[in-house]
Image (cartoon, rainbow, N blue to C red):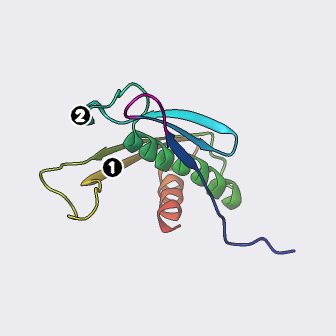
């Protein structure tokens, strides 16, 4: 039997009794998400923007590991740092909020620079 190339994901989020606080879940996992203080929200838990960036960084760690395994490259460890900037005075589009810039930095152990560049290239091509 062949594996489908289509993968579907779903998540849910709902307001709580605290203004600006959200209870989000996917499958059986729940987390509290706060809007940023700049919006009058608590800002104590991860914000939606931080959660989005953490998701991208997590995808980088997981997928590069999968790609390394598929290529027979023994990746000992990987970490991804990501930073995004939203500048409301210079919107990318007028109809939706977008990051003005996102910078991703991969750090790998157990691979050569050439292997690391190859793996990041494969990640970016996905």
Distance from label 1 to label 2 (Cα)?
23 Å
Rendered-image quadrant of the N terminus: bottom right
Q: Residue 73 in the image: x percent, y percent?
A: 65, 53
Q: Residue 28 in the image: x percent, y percent?
A: 70, 40
Q: Residue furthest left?
A: 89
Identify the secondary structure beneath mark 2: helix
Magenta-span inclusion, residue 17: yes
The part of the chain drawn in magenta is: 15-20
Q: Residue 43 in the image: x percent, y percent?
A: 35, 28
Q: Pick whichever, 77 or 57, lies toward us.
A: 57
Labelled pair 1, 2 in contact (Cβ < 8 Å): no
User: With 78 as the anchor, is 44 left or right in this view?
Assistant: left
Q: Pick whichever, 45 or 4, lies toward us.
A: 45
Q: Residues within 10 Å of mark 1 (few under 14, many from 20)?
A: few
Res. 109 image quadrant: top right
In the picture, the disc for residue 46 is none
User: With 24 as the anchor, is 101 left or right in this view?
Assistant: left
Q: Is residue 102 above or below residue 50?
A: below
Q: How many marks?
A: 2
Q: Residue 83 in the image: x percent, y percent?
A: 33, 43
Residue at horizontal 52 percent and vertical 50 percent from the top: 60
Give the dominant element type of the magenta stretch: helix, strand or loop: loop
**Residue that carries the numbered disc 2 in the rendered image:** 38
Q: Is residue 67 above or below residue 88?
A: below
**Residue that carries the numbered disc 1 in the rendered image:** 103
Q: Nearer the viewer, mark 1 or mark 2?
A: 2
Identify the secondary structure beneath mark 1: strand
Magenta-span inclusion, residue 79: no
Residue at horizontal 61 percent and vertical 55 percent from the top: 10
């Amino acid at each position: 039997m062949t594996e489908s190339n289509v993968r579907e994901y779903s998540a849910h989020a709902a307001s709580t009794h605290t203004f600006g606080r959200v209870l989000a879940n996917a499958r059986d996992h729940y987390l509290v998400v706060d809007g940023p203080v700049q919006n009058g929200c608590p800002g104590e838990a991860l914000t939606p923007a931080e959660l989005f960036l953490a998701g991208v960084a997590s995808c980088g760690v997981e997928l590069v590991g999968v790609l390394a395994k598929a290529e027979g490259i023994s990746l000992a460890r990987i970490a991804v740092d990501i930073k995004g900037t939203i500048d409301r005075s210079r919107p990318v589009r007028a109809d939706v909020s977008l990051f003005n810039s996102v910078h991703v930095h991969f750090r790998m152990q157990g691979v050569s620079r050439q292997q690391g560049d190859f793996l990041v290239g494969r990640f970016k091509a996905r």
